[in-house]
Amino acid sequence: MRSSLLRAAPAAAALLAAASGAPAAPVTLHIDAHQVAGRVSPLLYGLMTEEINYSYDGGLYAELVRNRTFQDNPQAPEHWSLVQEGGSQGAMALDRNQPLNAALPVSLRLDAAVAGAGRRVGIANDGFWGIPAKPDTTYRASFYAKASPGFAGTLTVSIESDEGGIVRARAEVASVGPAWKHYTVALTTGSIAPSAANRLVIATDRPGTVWFDLVSLFPPTWNNRPNGNRVDLMQLLSDLHPAFLRFPGGNYVEGRTIDTRFDWKRTLGDLAERPGHLDDAWHYRSSDGMGLLEFLEWCEDLHMQPVLAVFAGLTLDRQAPPVAPGPDLQPFVQDALDEIEYITGGASTKWGSRRAEDGHPSPFPLNFVEIGNEDQFDRKPGSYDARFTQFFDAIKAKYPNLNLIATAKVTTRQPDVQDDHYYRSAAQMESDTHHYDGTNRAGKKIFVGEWATREGVPTPNLGAALGDAAWLTGLERDSDIVIMSCYAPLFVNVNPGGMQWRTDLIGYDALRSYGSPSYYVQKMFNLHHGDQIVAARADNLPTRTWRPPRPRGAPAGAPLPPPEQEPALFFNATRDSRSGQLFVKFVNPTAAPQTVRVEIAGAGPLAADGLAVTLASAKPDDTNSIDQPTKIVPVETRLGGLGDDFNHTLAPYSVTILELHPRS
Ligand code: AHR
């Protein structure tokens, strides 16, 4: 079997010819529902997530204040500006001499030298590319503050427009004393138009000095969690009905150095005790507001299983050797054991009781733990084998029922599951839809833990969605062995500078969000399948010619591999064993309509009426965007004339799912 593990986008594969036109004989799909090839994995469709592209800060994590603890840049309070009006005079600076505590060692000092009525001095935050203000909405602002002795001013907290200072919502803190104290106010908007060109301002009209830390602003969140998630993004995720969440990475779990890995113990508890860390995998600082407990609550909110990735000694600094197996690695193995105990342990265990203290007395379910991320990049012979073995033995000794996932080949232990990653062009995806057909069914299971057709920026276009859909027909057909899959990356903030990795499933700015065509493919596939994989084969399948790219690592001048014939139509069939419904999926990646005759045996008499769910558009580079969020969405059509022998015409550039019902 050819190996297709690709880390980054390959050079685009050249399609040498479009579909060869209408085939000489009609395409006939034969489905035999008697022949059940296996069970569709109930875990097949899940989510993969990490702090990349402002996925949490500036994304799902609903915090609206950017650089809330003033640590993003040691030189200057980035994203903060000084407010001076009507001749007032003031200054603003980072202050390391008045820390809130050891975890948050820098505060922001505001000196109001000249201030009075109509002459305020304050600090303003510009948020993550703006601060959204929606009508009739209550925002919760909070901050730590202390003032110089004798300060007698009130603090006015407001959400204001960038231009013209139009106040969207406003509240007051009556007085601030000389010791650090936490203040919270509610800011409620009226019937305003939604806008994002706003800032949060905290100001005084009296002279004096005030220090601030952990300045925060939250909109209403999903399930009203106080440190929770953005509602529109959670809704998009919830609509996918994901079975699991793979977290916290990706490269984010590793970091470039051991110190910048995802160190879960530093992400727990009160926000004022979380130092945050540099996400040097993706080049910005993470507040760690999305900490271990928040990941788990996210799973709980969307009824997803956690798939926990633990740091396993390999960092992204490829010059640095991975942590050596043996005593050096043992603290990280212990960290993983502690983390599993935090998630699953009872109140009598050390880490289970810490979880209860953090606000979640009941343990979370946990069935899968992944040892590292992409450890094929550990080039030291035998190194991952030895590291995996050390983790495997320690975890299995304490938690024998946990399924352990390997991220690269190992030979010294049999992992329960192997994680494979694929980032490819649409043509490559379409050329490899039978990738797992020949995989040994008696061995480890497969988790396709990261994959995407990387065409389209910032989010995939229709052509990518067609590549994705073709690939998914294969994963679903092989989902007796491919038990889990998740697209990556999940999120991108579409503002300039928001994207570190192009082609991401869901895009958003401060106010709006949208699903890409690939998002809708995920949704269609997960909402329309049965629990049995049934036999399906085609006669006269159309083909087209494509030229595979040079193999990875081949010298630039090496000859291209010869052209190959690949299918120009993709399909699979599944059946619901309880209802008898059949789901037939088709992908037509060509510019021409394709008519398929569908002949079904073994499904009992089928009704003439059924449902077609179709995603299509005129051109492969058509797409959804922040300004055209629903240009390409699935359309449901009631059909007649179906049954166990019928013709159906697939639109050009389309994904179609036919739902066929037993005759009642
Ligand atoms: O999904 C983006 C990155 O691709 C992941 O962080 C990493 O695991 C992979 O290389």
Image: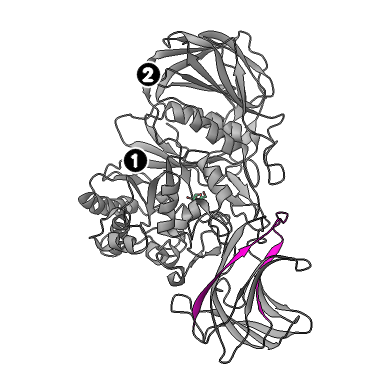
Q: How is the image coloured?
A: one colour
Q: Amino acid at mark 2?
A: Val
Q: Residue furthest bottom?
A: 150
SS of the residue under disc 1: strand
Q: Is residue 353 left or right of residue 302?
A: left
Of the numbered discs in the image, which one, if any, rests on residue 444? none
Q: State the predominant SS element of the stretch in magenta.
A: strand
Check disc 1 and report the residue beneath it. Answer: 417
Q: Quadrant of residue 95?
A: bottom right
In this image, 129 relative to 401: left or right?
A: right
Q: Position of residue 533 (x, y in %)?
A: 41, 22
Quick one: 391 or 118, which is closer to the camera? 118
Using the numbered discs, state the Cα–Cα distance from disc 2 to disc 1 in whole angstroms.
Answer: 23 Å
Residue 548 visible in rendering: no
Where 269 falls versus 59 (above or below)? below
Numbered range of the magenta stretch: 180-204
x and y percent of residue 398 in the render?
21, 52
Residue 478's image quarter?
A: top left
Quarter of the picture holding the N terminus:
top left
Q: Secondary structure at mark 2?
A: strand
Q: Is residue 416 magenta?
A: no
Q: Residue shown at 41%/37% (left/top)? A: 484
**Residue 570: where, in percent of width, then height?**
55, 23
Residue pointed to by mark 2? 36
Mark 2: is the Cβ under 8 angstroms from ligand 1?
A: no
23 left or right of 618 in image = left
Residue 239 in the figure: left or right of residue 358: right
